[in-house]
Amino acid sequence: FVPLIYKANIDGFALNRVTGLSNDQIVTSFTTICQYLSIFHHGPLQVPYFTLSKHALIHFADVRKVMIVLQLYLPIGAVLAFFLIQKAIKEREVSYLKLTAIISALILIFFGFVGLSDFSSAFTMMHQLLFHNNYWLMDPLVDPVINIFPEEFFKLCLIAILIIIIVI
């Protein structure tokens, strides 16, 4: 869903004006970074239309580590959950499912409230928790690539994630 959200909002984010690039150039750069974050990507990050500083490269490498953990966790967690739920149903021990639903709802409400009430602060806090340096604080004059990632894009991603969790 990320490319759909991104492409649908390029004009709304005024990325052409901010970056001086065409929609196609912006999407190409964005897609290159998304591919780099994939567990299947091999090689260094080279973003068309942008030169990245050493700190930007380190930050994107740090983001890639987080994304790889998530890409591994999701399928492993899903398979493990499937077998544990199947076993619980077979043994007619499903009371934990109610507790799991309540805990999941509370987590959803918490992150939804925190993320949507003051997204900028939540976004900053998330970076401070996940990254052990300040390289995520990119200067657009040094690393203009940051301009293709407006904070509003990440807020829309959060909303999409919350909606998907609710549907699931």
Image (cartoon, grey):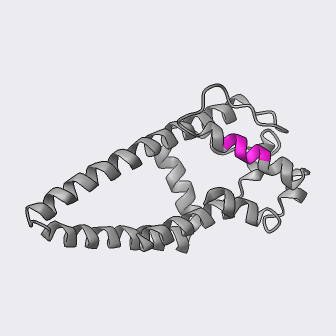
Q: Is residue 13 left or right of residue 97?
A: right
What residue lies at 51% left-to-right and 67% top-to-bottom?
115
The C terminus sits in image quarter? bottom left
Q: Is residue 120 left or right of residue 73?
A: right
Q: Is residue 168 above or below residue 54?
A: below
Residue 33 position within the rendered picture, expressed as x and y whole percent measured from the top left: 68, 41
Q: Is residue 19 above or below residue 53?
A: below
Residue 139 position within the rendered picture, expressed as x and y whole percent measured from the top left: 75, 44
Camera-side residue: 59 or 98? 98
What residue lies at 9% left-to-right and 67% top-to-bottom?
92
Q: Is residue 98 left or right of residue 105?
A: left
Magenta stretch contains residue 159: no
Q: Which residues are magenta?
A: 28-33
What residue lies at 55% left-to-right and 64% top-to-bottom?
158
Q: Is residue 64 above or below residue 80?
A: above
What residue lies at 66% left-to-right and 26% top-to-bottom?
44
Magenta stretch contains residue 29: yes
Q: Is residue 56 above or below residue 7?
A: above
